[in-house]
Amino acid sequence: MSIIKRITVTRFEYPLRNIGVAPNGFDSVYKANHTGTGSQQVVTIETDDGVRGEYMGGMGLMMSQILYLAPKMIGANAFHREFFHDEFKRALRKFDRMGVGPLDNCLWDWAGKKLGCSVQQLLGASKTRIKAYASTYHGDREGGLSTPEDFASFAEECYDLGFRAFKMHGWPDGIVEEEEAAILLLGERVGDRMALMYDSACHLRTFADAVRVGLACDKANFFWYEDPYRDSGISQQGHRKLRELIRTPLLIGEHVRGLEAKADFVAADATDFVRVNPDYDMGITGAVKIAHMAEAAGLDVEVHSSGPAQRHCVAAFRNTNYYELGLVGRNCDASRAPAYLGDYSDTLQSVDSEGYVPVPQGVGLGVTYNWDMIEQKKVEQHIFE
């Protein structure tokens, strides 16, 4: 047995060059000559045999759930991931369960280090690199991605770097004519060279808006259309109806938590691809369950967001297509915390000439964190023993 004796949760902040907050107060966008602030938490789990798991991921709003669950793991066997998954699923039944992911992912890192192998080996994967798409910041009004031309020229820049797939996040305003123009221009400029995706992030205000933009995606031959309108990406009826009216495949599920809810979405014919995130969907343990559910339904699963856990999942899932590298833009920092030592990175320059990124091959998740930087920039820390 390997008994958990200490869990440490550290939150730190880091600067983001030329990144600020959109006028709506929520979305991150390009902002010239401004230094924004990113926030990230790192979980470490130590066992009585001297092995330590580490994981950085998720978002600050998860913190209260992480701090609620962590002390309940002290004294338990670190191999018992399914037990934790089952207990935490019930314990957080009234909530979204997003705090489970960082703890579960940390246990996977711990298990790989304990057993002397990588997480992708634990998952049965054999890939050493995976295809990536450039996933943009939202459109801005500051001269970064401010016009349809900006998105099209940035896609060409990404192509020159090696990317063969590109995803546009629309403007927070949700102006249909603007979204349509950008989608059609992207199709005209790079549609014959790149797989194109569009993600409204639920900015479009009505079902009618979603249909109009979806028809533009049809004309431009987009690979998928993601979270279109203000239902918050959770209406099975709405997306089933949208699928009847457009040809572009829908990718829904980023805002639907857990195995059963996503399975119900699939059963209702409300999506074409299934979305999963090991940070949001109860860790790698939960993500594997969802990927297998999608596979049983004959559908592909697409892993949301960037990070080592995401790379190992993409490498392991047979029924997936791309790794999401983002958020990125021109003349600004990528959104992910630069807290790694070694060559791991989720910046635009991470891809090779064919648009692939490497899967970390070391033990556990295969990355090393810059603990000097994390300690220097920490804003809170909690220790459970």
Image: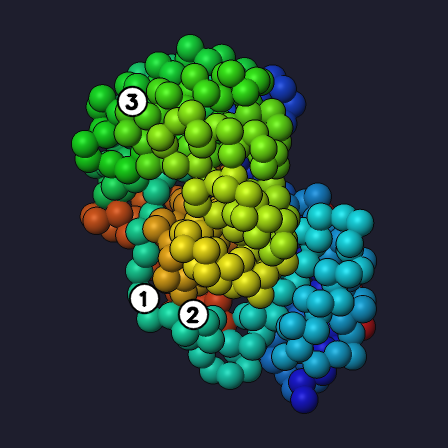
Camera-nearest label, 3 or 1: 3
Q: Is residue 143 above or below residue 291?
A: above
Determine the CA span between mark 1 and mark 2: 8 Å
Say which residue label 3 marks: 219
Badge 2: residue crowd in 10 Å (few <14, some 14–19, many ≥20) = many
Q: Inspect this view and state whether residue 112 appears.
A: yes
Sequence order check: which comes first, mark 2 or mark 3?
2
Dot 1 amino acid type: Lys
Quadrant where the C terminus is found in the figure: bottom right
Image point (39%, 36%), residue name: 249
Instruction: Tell which of 45 and 1 is nearer to you.
Output: 1
Which of the labelled discs sits on residue 120, or is there none?
2
> Coloring scheme of the render?
rainbow
What percent of the width, then of the height, locates residue 302? Answer: 44, 49
Badge 3: residue crowd in 10 Å (few <14, some 14–19, many ≥20) = some
Could you say whether the residue bearing mark 2 is in a helix, strand or loop?
Answer: helix
Q: Is residue 340 above or below residue 196?
A: below
Dot 2 amino acid type: Gln
Instruction: Tell which of 194 and 116 is nearer to you.
Output: 194
Badge 1: residue crowd in 10 Å (few <14, some 14–19, many ≥20) = some
Say which residue label 1 marks: 127
Q: Determine whether, in the image, residue 316 is placed left or right of residue 92.
A: left
As drawn, which residue projects farthest toward the top?
177
Instruction: Tell which of 208 and 18 is nearer to you.
Output: 208
What percent of the width, then of the height, locates residue 259? Answer: 60, 56
Whether the residues at callouts 1 and 2 have beta carbons within 8 Å, the answer is yes
Q: Determine whether, in the image, residue 300 is placed left or right of residue 339.
A: left
Whether the residues at callouts 2 and 3 have beta carbons within 8 Å, the answer is no
Residue 5 occupies which quadrant of the picture? bottom right
